[in-house]
Image: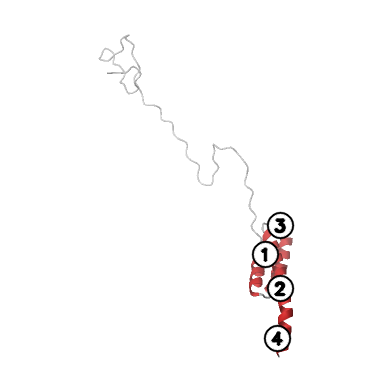
Amino acid sequence: MTYPNDPNQQPPYPGGHGGDPHGQQYPPQQPPSQQPTPPYPQYGQPDPYSYGGYAQQPTRGTNKMAIASLITSGVGLLVCSIACPVGAILGHVALGRIKKTGEEGRGLALAGIIIGWVGTVLLVVVAAFVIPAVVAEL
């Protein structure tokens, strides 16, 4: 059984079996034209089919001195040492550099300053009670 719109049906042959009852001849079927596919863009190259969009802003790194301030203040607070005021001072210097350069790390520097000065106050209070107690024992 043949269907009139079947794309897989062979074209009728002139004067042969399965021809058109009206005597029309069809041109021979050709395979669909193969369009070459465009190559994909290489890694790191812009896509030629995309819109321009927004350019990414270069990221500024985190200020290393702000990181050092937080670490030094935290260690100084844990071991109750002279590292607390050093961390606080590093934090102040880091804040100044962050304002000039626009780097990230303002929150780290502030945390280093706060922890450093709180640790310094605790160090002074502990020293005020421990030193007289040790001297009295002698």
Q: Which mark is residue 101?
A: 3
Residue denoted by label 4: 134
Of the two numbered discs 1 and 2 on the same chain, state the one appearing first in sequence. Answer: 1
Screen quadrant of the N terminus: top left
Q: Farthest left residue?
A: 17
Q: Is residue 30 left or right of residue 101?
A: left
In this view, 30 is above or below 51 = above
Of marks 1 and 4, the one in the foreground: 4
Screen quadrant of the C terminus: bottom right
User: The residue tagged with tag 2: helix, strand or loop?
Assistant: helix
Q: Is residue 36 left or right of residue 118?
A: left
> How many C-alpha atoms fall within 10 Å of the one at disc 2: few (<14), some, or many (≥20)?
some
Label 1 with label 2: CB-CB less than 8 Å:
no
Nearest to the observer: residue 132 or residue 81? 132
User: The residue tagged with tag 4: helix, strand or loop?
Assistant: helix
Q: Is residue 123 left or right of residue 40?
A: right
Of marks 2 and 3, the one in the foreground: 2
Which quarter of the picture shows residue 96?
Answer: bottom right
- Measured in 3D between alpha carbons, the distance from the residue under mark 1 to the one under mark 4, in whole angstroms, is 37 Å
- Measured in 3D between alpha carbons, the distance from the residue under mark 4 to the one under mark 3, in whole angstroms, is 48 Å
- Measured in 3D between alpha carbons, the distance from the residue under mark 1 to the one under mark 3, in whole angstroms, is 13 Å
Residue denoted by label 2: 122
In the rendered image, residue 37, in percent from the top left (x then y), is placed at 45, 35
Q: Amino acid at mark 3?
A: Thr
Residue denoted by label 1: 65
In the rendered image, residue 136, in percent from the top left (x then y), is placed at 73, 88
Q: Amino acid at mark 1?
A: Met
